[in-house]
Amino acid sequence: MKSTKYFTKKLLALLVALAMTAMLAACAGNSGGSTEATSEAPVETQAAAAFEQTVTPNYLGTFIPTFSSRSGDSYTVGLYVKGNEVVGDYSYLSDFATADPANGVTVSDISIDASGTGFTAIAVQGTGDEKSTVNISNVDIKAYDDSDGTNACDFTGLGTVIVASGAGENAHSVVNVDNVNIETKGFVRDGIIVDDYSDAIVTNSTITTYGANPLTDSYPTYMNTAKQAYMLSPPWIMSFLGGARSANVLGDYSSLSVIDSDVTTGAWAVLSTDDCTAPVVNVINSSINIEPATSEYGMNGGAELFGYDYAYGSGYGTYSIGGANEYFYGAEFNGVTMATVMTGTGETYYGPSYSGLTLKNGTGEDIYTYNGEAKNTVVNGVNGVMDHQGGTAV
């Protein structure tokens, strides 16, 4: 899956604590891009300076303009990119990105360690008739949250690590993610959200979202619901538990492509679509995993009630709604209650990968050509496809 690369980094460690205290450390030297090491082991990087500062939520509103059921949330933002520019007023980490009006914003060779609610590392929005392009490479992001879910929503990007959103076909975002490691814990602390004509292309990366247990960790008045503005877990009728989706594709004609990567959730969902029209999900030679019930962050979604083996997890690998088209080439599903849940129109395809394979986004544009190893798609789980109210599996 994820290819192994070693880099000499400049290091940025960001801690956003529950009291909203931040610690940053930057490495001296190596002010340029990543450099591949010649040894077989990762290069040690030393932090040359560290300082603490108190940070507070710096953005009020929503990063997902297509979702109108919730607004006025408080975000703490690392980098806010709009129209190929970093918006300094809403970016605590603006010094760690380079902006080029023609080619977009580049973020590389940093690590971020955050805890606390409402933290979004990178938020990208198109504006007017101008798309926003962000290239993220050689970045490690850890975002943990032990709160009860009162300040969390994965329909607005609140608490999501990377948000790529748009305001129409000509004002969309393109986010390229390469050699990035994302790890989160907490209610709906998604790795990536893509919205409204925007595209996210993830290569050689790892996304792990452990979630939280809605039966024990949610706020006292929380009730399981399908109302999107308040949903911290899947609707009970789906027969599994969980507290996070590793990725969520929203809005009109958005796309998410995952290549040579590993994506894992503690429980609920790995790659999801929701509140959308005709999104596209592409997966090539990547693993789609749910932690087993016996692991630290896995959840018992049916081992006792339905007789599932404890080796399986609780949740689905992918969801297909709103006319979604999802394509799995050389994908490996592990531990899923269901590989795919389908509803409505749309097509889900399972097949082998091959060199020369070209991926398209939601508007039919060619966005990526794969040249690599050929593999078959494999499902290791309790069920394959659950289809309700239509859809086609091939």
Image: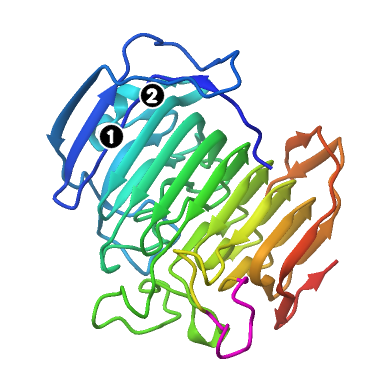
Q: Residues within 10 Å of mark 2 (few under 14, many from 20)?
A: some
Q: Residue at x 43, y 32 (%)?
A: 83
Q: Is residue 351 above or below residue 355?
A: below
Which numbered tag is attached to residue 97? Answer: 2
Q: Amino acid at mark 2?
A: Ala
Q: Would residue 77 appear left or right of 190 to someone viewing this image?
A: left
Which numbered tag is attached to residue 91? Answer: 1
Residue extending farthest top: 29
Residue 362 within the segment the image draws in magenta = no
Q: Is residue 319 visible?
A: no
Q: Nearer the viewer, residue 293 or 186?
A: 293
Residue 357 at x, y percent in the picture: 83, 40
Magenta span:
301-312
Residue 155 image-quadrant placement: bottom left
Q: Secondary structure at mark 2?
A: loop
Q: Would residue 387 appear left or right of 48 to someone viewing this image?
A: right
Q: How many marks?
A: 2
Q: Residue at x 56, y 44 (%)?
A: 206
Residue 305 within the segment the image draws in magenta = yes
Q: Is residue 53 above or below residue 348?
A: above
Quadrant into which the C terminus falls: bottom right
Q: Which numbered disc flags the more N-terminal residue, 2 or 1?
A: 1
Q: Residues within 10 Å of mark 1 (few under 14, many from 20)?
A: many
Which numbered tag is attached to residue 384? Answer: none
Q: Residue at x 49, y 81 (%)?
A: 235
Residue 226 at x, y percent in the picture: 45, 80
Q: Secondary structure at mark 1?
A: loop
